[in-house]
Image (cartoon, grey):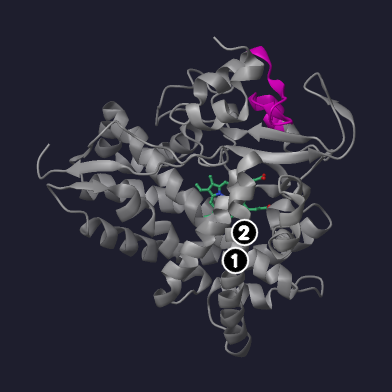
């Protein structure tokens, strides 16, 4: 077996272990739970307790735009400056007092009432997509179901016209390739992301101008008029919020639905239990899917000061990666963590993060996953995995299936 330092180099971490990163996570957690990864020049935190305490520790900052800046060649930085300025305004990368102010404003637009109102519409969308799944032919559920559902929901929620949805989605994906790339890959995506962002902002700017004149019941209008303590989002903050919510709201949920369905198909006993008592088990299935294959693998922070954490001396400015997917497989918190068990009593998984940056879309994501699982087993009870040859997207930040090949038959 490779020594830990070599086995956590960037290439090994990202590429060779994509199919199953968990043996490496387990090894890190038991041998060196707060591990300095020299090739990547950052700390990897794998234990549940360390992630839980770290994510609410104010000695860690979320402002890590310089991580993006430093990963780019100097001559490229100037060319992509608008992208870097924009990313620095993403709510996830801000600290208080900006973070508190932004969160207060955006929460006004994300009311539980607004989310609940989406439920019947999501049910209709799910049924429509499942109607399109052909019986007797192989189908990729990522392309036909898990992808289109959250993308349509976030577009409708924001108020993006149907005709422009694909353009928004494709441009957002190009920005996302940059933001989730990490390390040496960042430079490969920066210029393309900067170009896509320009187009994206022009499109949002046009829709925002329309909402200022004629507001309606969508999230975009709510963000435009959101006001707290006499403050509103500046134009740049509004752009950053629109892009970030769009980006945060669909790929993550796509992955949650796809990995959850995969886990169910790979565990026929659990699938049978869900089918037999869908009302009683579907919520547990959603939480277990989020724990078992956490769609967002990591939350990154930067040390504000020198301090000791998990027995290690962390230096000011160093990056610390809280591996949520590893914490959610910590046997101290979740006995037999590699077992997929929809009846598990989950104490508190970290799939939506923890602390002040806890996911703003958790209620919506859970609702989409629940409706997707519920409708899938009711409408397509004879769905089966068509191949075990599964590919995962080559990134350390998200856990994303490239395709989910299934076959659907009339009878079991
Ligand atoms: C299964 C789906 C989802 C997962 C696993 C997920 C996961 C996460 C995680 C782990 C964080 C915290 C990151 C950190 O601490 O650095 C986060 C933040 C966030 N998420 Fe989600 N998310 C999901 C769906 C959504 C949806 C549907 C939306 C919006 C429609 C959304 C909007 C946000 C926003 C705005 C933040 C930033 C909050 C802040 O910084 O204060 N997410 N999400």
Camera-side residue of 162 and 181? 181
Q: Is residue 206 above or below residue 247?
A: below
Proximity of marks 2 and 1: CB atoms separated by less than 8 Å = yes
- On the question of residue 353 being in view, the answer is no
Q: Would you say residue 42 sits in the magenta stretch?
A: yes
Q: Residue at x 34, y 37 (%)?
A: 262
Q: Position of residue 86 (x, y in %)?
A: 70, 63
Q: Secondary structure at mark 1?
A: helix
- The verdict on residue 28 being magenta is no
Residue 179 is left or right of residue 283, and the answer is right
Which residue is nearer to you in this view: 178 or 110? Answer: 178
- Residue 338 horizontal side relative to residue 140, left or right: right
Residue 108: x and y in percent read: 66, 67
Q: Is residue 390 visible?
A: yes
Q: Quadrant of residue 220?
A: bottom right
The image quadrant of residue 197 is: bottom right
Residue at image location 61% in from the left, 30% down from the top: 10
Residue bearing mark 1: 195
Report how far apart the C-alphas of labels 2 and 1 lie in the structure: 6 Å
Residue placed farthest to the top in the image?
1
Helix, strand or loop for disc 2: helix
Residue named by callout 2: 191
Q: Residues within 10 Å of mark 1 (few under 14, many from 20)?
A: some
Does the closest atom of ligand 1 sit within 8 Å of the Cβ of label 2? Answer: no
Residue found farthest to the right? 306
The structure residue drawn at horizontal position 80% and vertical position 52%, both measured from the top left corner, is 95
Rendered-image quadrant of the N terminus: top right
Q: Which residue appears farthest toward the left when viewing the image?
A: 411
**Picture residue at 12% right of the left edge, 36% below the top:** 412
Residue 247, given in percent of the width and then of the height, sits at: 55, 58
Please state the extent of the stretch shown in magenta in the rendering.
Answer: 31-52
Q: Position of residue 314 (x, y in %)?
A: 83, 28
């Amino acid at each position: 077996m490779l020594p830990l330092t070599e086995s956590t180099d960037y290439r090994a971490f990202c590429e060779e272990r994509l199919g199953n990163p968990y043996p490496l996570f387990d090894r890190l957690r038991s041998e060196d739970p707060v591990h300095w990864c020299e090739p990547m020049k950052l700390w990897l935190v794998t234990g549940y307790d360390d992630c839980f305490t770290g994510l609410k520790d104010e000695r860690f900052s979320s402002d890590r735009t310089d991580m993006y800046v430093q990963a780019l060649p100097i001559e490229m930085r100037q060319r992509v400056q608008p992208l870097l300025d924009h990313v620095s305004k993403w709510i996830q990368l801000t600290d208080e007092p900006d973070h508190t102010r932004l969160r207060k404003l955006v929460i006004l637009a994300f009311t539980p009432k607004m989310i609940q109102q989406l439920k019947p519409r999501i049910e209709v969308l799910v049924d429509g997509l499942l109607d399109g799944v052909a019986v007797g032919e192989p189908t990729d559920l990522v392309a036909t179901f898990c992808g289109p559902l959250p993308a349509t929901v976030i577009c409708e929620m924001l108020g993006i016209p149907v005709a422009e949805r694909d353009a928004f989605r494709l441009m957002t994906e190009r920005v996302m390739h940059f933001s989730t790339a990490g390390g040496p890959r960042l430079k490969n995506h920066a210029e393309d992301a900067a170009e896509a962002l320009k187009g994206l902002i022009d499109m949002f700017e046009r829709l925002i101008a329309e909402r200022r004149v004629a507001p309606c019941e969508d999230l975009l209008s709510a963000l435009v008029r959101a006001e707290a303590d006499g403050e509103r989002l500046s134009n740049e903050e509004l752009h950053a919020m629109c892009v970030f919510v769009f980006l945060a709201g669909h790929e993550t949920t796509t992955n949650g639905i796809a990995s959850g369905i995969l886990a169910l198909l790979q565990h026929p006993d659990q699938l049978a239990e869900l089918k037999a008592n869908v009302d009683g088990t579907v919520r547990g299935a959603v939480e277990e899917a989020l724990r078992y294959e956490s769609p967002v693998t990591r939350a990154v922070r930067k040390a504000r000061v020198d301090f000791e954490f998990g027995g290690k001396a962390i230096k000011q400015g160093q990056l610390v990666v809280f591996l949520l997917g590893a914490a959610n497989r910590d046997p101290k918190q979740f006995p037999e963590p590699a077992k997929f068990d929809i009846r598990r009593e989950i104490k508190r998984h970290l799939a939506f993060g923890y602390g002040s940056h806890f996911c703003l879309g958790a209620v919506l994501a859970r609702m989409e996953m629940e409706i997707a699982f519920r409708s899938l087993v009711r409408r397509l009870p004879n769905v089966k995995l068509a191949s075990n040859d599964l590919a995962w997207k080559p990134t350390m930040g998200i856990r994303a299936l490239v395709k989910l090949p299934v076959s659907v038959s009339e009878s079991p």
